Amino acid sequence: MLRIGRNASVSFPNFSCWRVRLKLLTGGHMPVTETLDQRWYDTANIQLCIIKDFVALCRELGIRIEKR
């Protein structure tokens, strides 16, 4: 989005599966599971992450987060 525009809005899904939520709680990052067997940014069609993962990616790419 930032290749085209100056600003972008991003939203995140709310996970309800207790196993995924437990892994998020204990690990702090989007878990790799049997169903979601790739890192959140390597999936072919959907890209699932949590805010902590997104902030780290923005930091790696030099993207400034204006408001959260």
Image (cartoon, rainbow, N blue to C red):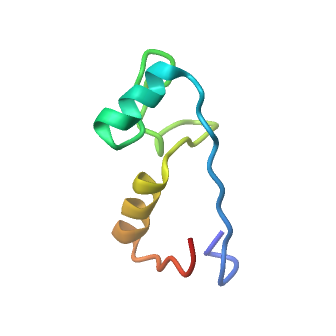
Q: Quadrant of residue 3?
A: bottom right
How many callouts does the rendering have?
Answer: 0
Does residue 31 appear in the picture of this structure? no
**How far across and how far down the image is residue 13, in percent?**
64, 42
The C terminus lies in quadrant: bottom right
Residue at 49% from the left image edge and 48% from the top image edge: 50
**How far across and how far down the image is residue 62, in percent?**
39, 77
Image height of 23 relative to 52, above or below: above
**How far across and how far down the image is residue 27, in percent?**
30, 37
Does residue 46 appear in the picture of this structure? yes
* 26 sits left or right of 31 in the view: left
Residue at 66% from the left image edge and 72% from the top image edge: 8
Direction top: furthest residue: 34
Image height of 30 relative to 64, above or below: above
Residue at 37% from the left image edge and 43% from the top image edge: 29
* 36 sits left or right of 4 in the view: left
Image height of 35 relative to 57, above or below: above
Q: Nearer the viewer, residue 48 or 4?
A: 48
**How far across and how far down the image is residue 49, in percent?**
50, 45
The N terminus lies in quadrant: bottom right
Image height of 52 relative to 42, above or below: below
Residue at 47% from the left image edge and 45% from the top image edge: 41
